[in-house]
């Protein structure tokens, strides 16, 4: 949790590789609850969300949620991530 102390805020995040020094993967779940659909939840420690960590939800290669870890599974309807959790979803902010 304190590995990121005194780090500068991430810069030039338009290049995805630039985020890597600021995150540490913790665990990943692969769900097959929906037939023919593969969804993944990745939980990470990150510099700007030290208390809750970061969660990424990806389904069939499409990112649905990137934000503070809310314990969301990766098999919910897309509207849950894109509408119900939109205020916490960094992907929504990137599209604005």
Image (cartoon, grey):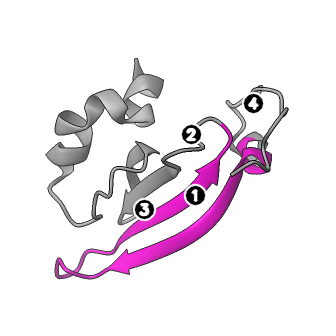
Q: Residues within 10 Å of mark 2 (few under 14, many from 20)?
A: some
Q: Earlier in the sequence, mark 2 or mark 4?
A: 4
The quarter in which the C terminus is drawn is: top left
Q: Earlier in the sequence, mark 4 or mark 3?
A: 4
Residue position marked by numbered label 4 in the rendering: 10
Q: Residues within 10 Å of mark 3 (few under 14, many from 20)?
A: few
Is the residue 11 above or below the residue 54 in the image?
Answer: above
Q: Earlier in the sequence, mark 2 or mark 1?
A: 1
- Image quarter for residue 73? bottom left
Q: Earlier in the sequence, mark 1 or mark 4?
A: 4
Front residue of 52/72: it is 52
Relative image position of residue 71 (x, y in whole percent): 32, 58
Front residue of 41/54: it is 54
Relative image position of residue 7 (x, y in whole percent): 83, 34
Residue position marked by numbered label 3 in the rendering: 61
- Assess whether mark 3 and mark 4 are in contact (beta carbons under 8 angstroms): no
Q: Which mark is residue 49?
A: 2
């Amino acid at each position: 949790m304190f590995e990121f102390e005194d780090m500068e805020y991430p810069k030039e995040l338009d290049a995805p590789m630039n985020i890597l020094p600021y995150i540490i993967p913790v665990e990943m779940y692969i769900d097959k609850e929906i037939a023919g659909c593969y969804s993944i939840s990745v939980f990470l420690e990150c510099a700007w969300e030290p208390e809750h960590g970061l969660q990424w939800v990806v389904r069939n290669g499409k990112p649905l949620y990137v934000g503070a870890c809310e314990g969301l599974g990766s098999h919910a309807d897309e509207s849950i991530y894109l509408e119900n959790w939109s205020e916490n979803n960094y992907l929504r902010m990137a599209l604005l």
